[in-house]
Amino acid sequence: MSTTLTISKEHIAKTPGVCGGKACIAGHRIRVMDIVASYVQRGMKPSEILDEYPGLTIADVHAALAYYHDHREEVDADFQRDEELDRYGRTQPSKLRDAMTKQPS
């Protein structure tokens, strides 16, 4: 008689109110987008991503990349929204930004 043991760990979570409801590594506030940006845009290897996010496992990194490939339109739309918000924020007055860029006398 053969016994099959199935072990499953949930790696990706989407929780309203956590990281704007975007897909994150379960138990962390690290978005799938953050892993994808490191891997795709910065050309980092999964092992290098672990150095940047030491609380993650290699399975977490691969799960984030798999999630991206399975939900590419969703994650790309998240990137687009973040970019639009950043662009909007740069065009609006900000007392904090003004204070930070003000040269000391």
Image (cartoon, grey):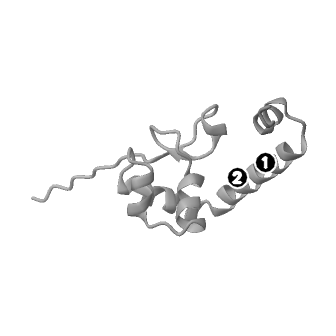
The spot of residue 104 in percent (x, y) is 77, 33
Q: Is residue 49 left or right of residue 71?
A: left
| C-alpha span from label 1 to label 2 | 12 Å
Q: In this view, does 95 lie to the left or right of 73?
A: right
The amino acid sitting under disc 2 is Asp
Between 12 and 103, the one nearer to me in the picture: 103
Q: In this view, does 74 lie to the left or right of 98?
A: left
What residue did someone put label 1 on? Answer: 86
Q: How crowded is mark 1: few (under 14 residues within 10 Å), some or many (20 or more)?
A: few
Residue 11 is marked as: none
Tell me the residue at 83%/51% (across/down): 87
Q: In this view, does 90 lie to the left or right of 76?
A: right
Q: Circle 1 — which element?
A: helix
Which quadrant is the N terminus positioned in? bottom left
Q: In which quarter of the image is residue 42?
A: bottom right
Residue 78 is marked as: 2
